[in-house]
Amino acid sequence: MEYRYLGRSGMKVSEVCLGAMTFGREADEATSHRMLDRFAELGGTFVDTADVYGPGTSEEVTGRWLTRQDRDQWVIATKVRFPSGSGVNDVGLSRKHILASIDASLRRLHTDHVDLYQIHCWDRGTPLEETLTTLDTLVTSGKVRYLGASNVTGWQLQKMIDVARQLGLERMLTLQPQYNLLARPTEWELIAVCEAEGLGVIPWGPLRGGWLSGRYTREMSGPPVGSRVETAAEKGWSETWDAYANEHTWGILDVLRDIANAHGCPIAQVAIRWVSQRPGVTAPILGASTYDQLEANLGAVGWSLNDEEMDRLTTVSEIRSPYPYDDMISNAQRDR
């Protein structure tokens, strides 16, 4: 396992992060702890959860495991934004909700601090200054070490950075976006902002809900019964069969399969390697419902794709950029 600095900070994290969204849900506590043990055995140090996973159950499962570890060796990330209860103020990024949420997360995690505290999504109802000043107090109080954002747009991320800079507040250190071979628009602004401002990128969904695992093929007329893709529509998830069962996806999978065969490894490992080796990326988040899934995905560490393989995957997964991200604007900027 390699270790990388997290954004423009002096803190290092393992080259992959273990996502805990399934803990206490698809994976029971015994299985979740077994996955954490295996991750630790291979040198993993970075775990990502959220107060809404469960809700709260993921943090509780992670916290009970954490009590048996050397806390200082672990980088624990969690999030705030979505409903934590049924009350009218149990949602959003207000001072009231953030302060209540961090204390609840710390109790569930059995720790006195969170290493990375992330806003889970933008809140249009709360003044940004209120959110940022509250987060700053969490850092100065010692309850939080660093701040991050997830699921925001390019202008929102830049706005947070600029306002924090203007007010002299602790700024965002990381971005947690969806980023994979089937989600390339993340590059249009978000990755560019992160590279310019020194934010570490910790992508979620490197396998796009299983689409890049090799489980689905063009010969199928539909997804297997009970699979994530089969249940996506009823759960409100976007990785539905109708959205991705097309030649663009199959073309990416053809190249993934060819490269995987050359390396003698599963397709999923190649997809994870591509994300891990992209500019600006610190550590992809690996989520798994079973121990065997995690074991297979952890095989993505310890080796690299060569330049030709990276180029093949980058080329086959490209999509036509809309204005103003298209070639006309790019060429005009290049020629200035």
Image: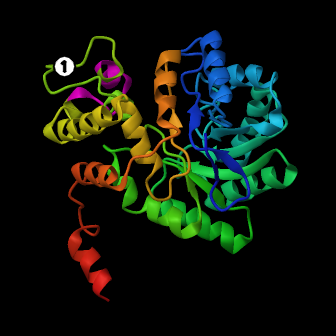
Viewer-nearest residue: 287 or 225: 287
Q: Quadrant of residue 111?
A: top right
The amino acid on which the numbered mark 1 sits, given as a three-letter code, is Gly
- Quarter of the N terminus within the rendering: top right
Q: Quadrant of residue 169?
A: bottom right
Q: Which residue is mark 1?
A: 222
Count of picture labels? 1
Q: Is residue 212 above or below residue 248?
A: above
Colour theme: rainbow
**Residue 20, position as x, y percentages in the image:** 59, 28
Viewer-nearest residue: 147 or 257: 257
Viewer-nearest residue: 319 or 137: 319
Could you tell me which residue is drawn at 63 percent across and 46 percent down?
118
**Residue 308, position as x, y percentages in the image:** 30, 54
Left or right, 323 with respect to 292, comes to: left
The answer to whether any part of residue 25 appears in the image is: yes
Q: Is residue 249 magenta?
A: no
Magenta segment boundaries in residue numbering: 230-241
Could you tell me which residue is drawn at 79 percent across and 50 percent down?
138
Q: Is residue 232 magenta?
A: yes
**Residue 270, position as x, y percentages in the image:** 37, 38
The answer to whether any part of residue 26 appears in the image is: no
Could you tell me which residue is drawn at 73 percent across and 32 percent down?
105
**Residue 201, position as x, y percentages in the image:** 53, 52
Which type of secondary structure does the marked residue at label 1 adopt?
loop
- Quarter of the C terminus within the rendering: bottom left
Q: Is residue 58 above or below residue 73?
A: above
Estimate how packed mark 1 is, as few (under 14), some (14 to 19) or many (20 or more) residues with alpha carbons within 10 Å.
some
Q: Is residue 217 above or below residue 140?
A: above
